[in-house]
Image (cartoon, rainbow, N blue to C red):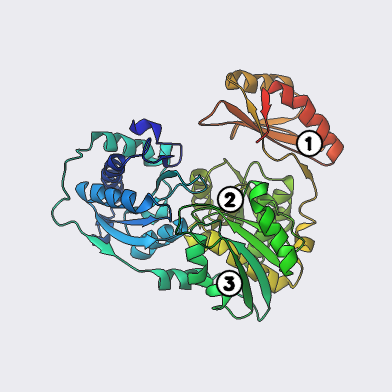
Amino acid sequence: MLGRVFKAYDVRGTYPDLLTDTMAFQIGSGAARYLLQDAAEAGETTPMMRNLVVGRDMRKSSPKLSAELIRGIRAGGASVIDVGLVDTSFVYFAINHLDCAGGVMVTASHNPPQYNGFKTSKRHAKPVGETTGLADVRKYAAMSDTNKQPQEGTFVDKRDLWDAYTEHVRAFLDMRGRKIKVVVDASNGMAGTMCPKIFGENGSAIEGLEIVEMNYENTKGVFVHEPNPLVASNVEDLCKAVVSEGADLGVCFDGDADRCVAVDEKGKIIGCDALTGLLAQYFLSKNPGASVVYDLRSTKAVAEEIEKAGGTAIRSRVGHVFMKQVMSEEDCVFGGELSGHFYFADNFGTDSGAIAMATVLSLMAEKKRKLSNMIRPIARYKQSGEINFENEEKDEAMELILEEYGDRGEIDELDGVTVDCFESEGWWCNIRKSNTEPLLRLNAEAKDQSTLNRMVAEIAPKLGTRVDH
């Protein structure tokens, strides 16, 4: 049963039919064993390295799952710093702030309310995915004794770190005496707790900032809309509110508030890759010659803007495990992903929705320009968005693409198959396999709309049956 809830990057399932309280105990025990072992092998033997941080989101099942997880962690030999109801990025901060062996966040991110799960991080908030420790957590969880009691000497310390976290996030915010009005859609998720703590009620803690609050209520376990800002229909009300309120910016967070999507003053959703290009310029102006990482589905304009600003552009596989690895290995100052994850060197190389919002506000205050005007030059190419295709024979379809386009343009297989004919024919695309479903995912881009339409029409029949959702 445990294998059904372990995914590529985390643990997730519907509660209580797939994900159970017993599993939470087992996963806590397995995580403790793995994370303590990882710290010991790295020579990290300080007293705090016997502790794990635990946080939880606002879902109704989170308190019980958190309690069982904590019991399992103590049975596995680790003590717990319980930071309570927080956003996921708070846990990353707490692990580093307290110098713990790692941590676990109880959340199902953008999934519907019947779901829940666990995001695990090791020391320094390094990600734990299938290839970076999660397989070991699963193995140790399966071996755990569910009747085992907390080990002698372990404890639970409930800790309020909001003051320290607030100070950390605000270090990224510089309003420069400017007045900015922003509509924030918390998606009935953890941003409804996080934003008032950091920015004050309606932005009252920050001089010059006015926040119009949407969907901040997060105690009822229901969502007005799915807490996934990547789905345009979930952001419609925010777009309308930005225009009707005469706001300068709109921000929509996902359920655990580690991701966000921005909306310009005209009520238009900004692609997260275009925003990556804009924020890259901001960070490179302060860190000349630095490296910036971006996910390989991003518009060509991202790399072009990074290089134009004097930085080094580094492509990465999709997913926070890979992005964070590149952030560390290449000493990147900043990184951005199409999914709305934004990564910051001064945030331990981890992602943060709160810091992303603070950085956009700082950029707007510095440039004194409308967001739409700053984005327009970057959003210069035509994109298909991600298109999904049902296909039970994914490998065969990928081989067909390699055969048919191998001598037509540049090919790489960093993540799926990327066909790059941008210089010769004015288009490129990436095709990736879903890890969990019989789906192929296509992202295409061209210099003009007619070329994009023609290439999508050419490639689509080779990938299977198009799924429009």
Q: Position of residue 151 (x, y in %)?
A: 15, 50
Q: Is residue 391 left or right of residue 346?
A: right
Say few, some or many: other residues with alpha carbon within 10 Å of mark 3 (under 14 / 14 to 19 / 20 or more): some
Say few, some or many: other residues with alpha carbon within 10 Å of mark 2 (under 14 / 14 to 19 / 20 or more): some
Cα distance in 3D space between marks 1 and 3: 38 Å
The residue type indicated by label 3 comes to: Leu
Say few, some or many: other residues with alpha carbon within 10 Å of mark 1 (under 14 / 14 to 19 / 20 or more): many
Residue 225's mark? Answer: 2
- The answer to whether 154 is drawn above or below residue 285 in the figure is above
Circle 1 or circle 3, nearest the eye: 3
Residue 427's mark? Answer: 1
- The answer to whether 185 is drawn above or below residue 248 in the figure is above
Q: Position of residue 296 (x, y in %)?
A: 64, 42
Q: Which residue is mark 3?
A: 173
Residue 31's mark? Answer: none
The earlier-in-sequence mark between 2 and 1 is 2
Q: Secondary structure at mark 1?
A: strand
The residue type indicated by label 1 comes to: Trp
Q: Is residue 77 left or right of residue 289?
A: left
Which residue lies most toward the left here?
152
Cα distance in 3D space between marks 2 and 1: 35 Å
Quadrant in the picture for residue 91: bottom left
Circle 2 or circle 3, nearest the eye: 2
